[in-house]
Image (tube, grey):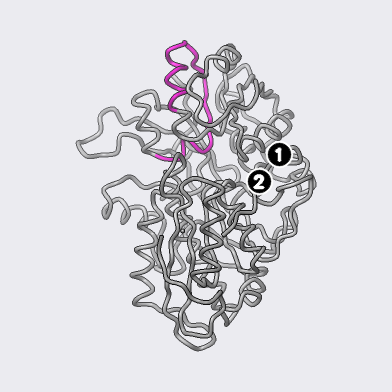
Amino acid sequence: MVRNGRVAQARALNVRAAVAWASTAALAGALAGCGEVGGGTVAGGGDDDVLRIGFVSTETGPSALFGEANTYVIEAMELWFADNPVTIDGTEHSVEIIVKDSQSSSARAGEVAAELINSDGVDLVLTSSTPDITNPVSEQCEANSVPCISTVAPWQPFAIREGDEPADLKYSYHAFWGLEDVSAVYADMWGQVDTNQKAAGLFPNDPDGQAWSANFPALTADTGVTIDDPGLYPNGTQDFSAQLSAFKGHDILVGVPIPPDFTTFWQQAGQQGYQPKVATIGKALLFPSAVEALGNAGDGLTSEVWWHPTAPFTSSLTGQTAQELADQYESDTGKQWTQPLGFAEALFEITVAAVEKAGSTEPDAITEALSTLEVSTVVGDVAWGADDSVPPYVAKTPLVGGQWRLDEGQDEGANPYELVVVSNTLAPEIPTGGEVEPLR
């Protein structure tokens, strides 16, 4: 085995380098105009004893797996707040959660965010699930001076939307890891397998694909791994013959496709005889149902892991550990736990901590509280203003790497795949369950 010795160096990259990584990415979501639940009230910051929270979720469309757990968490939070009102400046506030589906569309995300603000009168907006959704929601909040808390998008494509400088955001606060983190995790996993250090890049023409393709080659160059990118492909591509022809002889596969596109690609890879020694795929391999769709061909695939039940974190609201939350989700839904589950709950933990610290539902008071907020959540410690390597409205969260393992002898009703943590260099508090095994 060859261990990569550059992980610590990659972790130490500062924001100046991060800006350069994303400078060529076309990441700006169009400002949308003015979405399914909720009645009309005046704009946020009302003086009644109700905290109105808008949530732009992704429940339908090609990225729906990102929002698969959102409905569960929102319903659980509604029950929680019914028994546990939020105390703001000594007054108990009931909580109303108004949900809109982005339909996996940037334009739709902007539209429903505007509706939450202008028609539903929310005090703040929560959102997640790739920069395609977080960015247009943030832009509406900035335009209307309403607090926005977002997650589940690398911080660079969230923050750097035009040119080579982070956007000057005043009402948007984001909690997630960055490209410097995911590249370090990937490099550590690749270093556990003996390869020719030639990587094939599978990058779509969307904000994630643009940022990853523009920056990953530079981030991995000093590790000895070179990434060959035959060009961005459109989401929904049905024929990957051109990419597979270019990928021959590459022991490593890396990319960030949407789930249905990777299913198509991996099936065609098997048909055309391309099998790398290690395949590390962001976005598409985050979800158990997406891996199960590959059948036995999903065994041994690797990805980043932003949240795992074995992480030693606890909800500041419910007191549940990460493992207890995952177990409860599986018991209640009959589905396997999924990574966005923890981050959906963390959004509400952050919200409560922010309004309690602000002592108000006024937009400026909430954003002022967020600017220095520190809160321990079920996804780890979240702190804004504590890391000079990122914009002040970004709080980084822990990241590890994992490998999907097929349990060929599983009991009836057991999950066919388990996600095993195989790299914790950046977050040693999260235990590993093994090392990377080469694809067979």
Asked whether, in this view, residue 324 is left or right of residue 372, the answer is left
Residue 139 in picture, x, y percent from top left:
64, 57
Quarter occupied by the C terminus: top left
Specify whether residue 264 is painted magenta.
yes
Q: As rendered, which of 308 and 291 lies closer to the eye? A: 291
> Is 332 one of the magenta-colored residues?
no
The outermost residue toward the front is 33
Of label 1 and label 2, which has the lower sequence position? 1
Tell me the element at label 2. helix
Which disc number belongs to residue 25? 1
Q: Is residue 189 above or below residue 84?
A: above
Picture coordinates of residue 418, whole percent (x, y): 37, 37
- The residue positioned farthest toward the bottom in the image shown: 90
How far across and down, in percent of the image, does residue 169 sit?
71, 61
Residue assigned mark 2:
157
Q: Is residue 311 above or below residue 437?
A: below
Q: What's the residue type where badge 2 is placed?
A: Pro
The residue lying at 53 percent from left, 36 percent from top is: 282
Residue range corresponding to the magenta coloring = 263-287
Identify the residue at image location x=57%, y=81%: 360
Within the image, what quadrant is residue 296 found in? Answer: top left
Where residue 354 appears, as percent x and y from the top left, is 57, 72
Give the distance between the C-alpha atoms of the residues marked 1 and 2, in whole angstroms: 8 Å
Verify CB contact (< 8 Å) between mark 1 and mark 2. Answer: yes
